[in-house]
Amino acid sequence: MELLYASCVGVLVFCGVFLILRSRTFPVVLGLTMLSYGVNLFLFSSGRLSLNSAAVLGYSEVYADPLPQAFVLTAIVIGFAMTAFVVILAIRGRADLGNDHVNGQVPENKKKGKV
């Protein structure tokens, strides 16, 4: 189970970093979102992955650590607000500049019709 969990975190982080390095704004927004999901999973795993453990003290001999769960819940709220802000920034940049490239300039090979 730990190998599957770690590989999911690794794939999310890798895909997030790959998308952040793109030249368009929409893949950058998706990359930031995927990177935040990977970090949330990593934070959640810091509380030790355990099966059949109680979330509340006193109900079981083994219990889940509530601190990483609180961190992840806070990170989800912050990530949602950050994603909404970056989407609005991307829409505003597209409206002002006329394109959706990160630096605001269309590359030369795109201007001439080359792909």
Image (cartoon, rainbow, N blue to C red):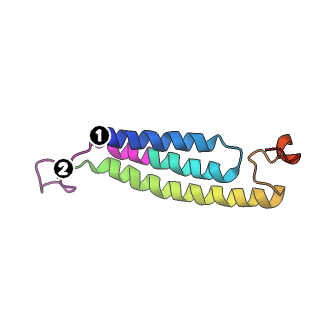
Q: Residue at x 79, y 61 (%)?
A: 95
Answer few, some or many: residues within 10 Å of disc 1's Cα (few below 14, many 20 plus, some between 14 and 19). Answer: few
Answer few, some or many: residues within 10 Å of disc 2's Cα (few below 14, many 20 plus, some between 14 and 19). Answer: some
Return the residue at label 2: 63
Near-viewer residue (106 or 72): 106
The disc placed on residue 2 is 1
Which range of residues does the magenta coloring cover? 39-63
- The amino acid on which the numbered mark 1 sits, given as a three-letter code, is Glu
Q: Going by the image, does 61 lie left or right of 89?
A: left
Picture quarter containing residue 26?
A: bottom right
- The amino acid on which the numbered mark 2 sits, given as a three-letter code, is Tyr
Q: Residue furthest right?
A: 112
Q: Residue at x 45, y 52 (%)?
A: 75
Picture quarter containing residue 103?
A: top right
In percent of width and height, residue 79 lies at 52, 54
Q: Going by the image, does 114 lie left or right of 41?
A: right
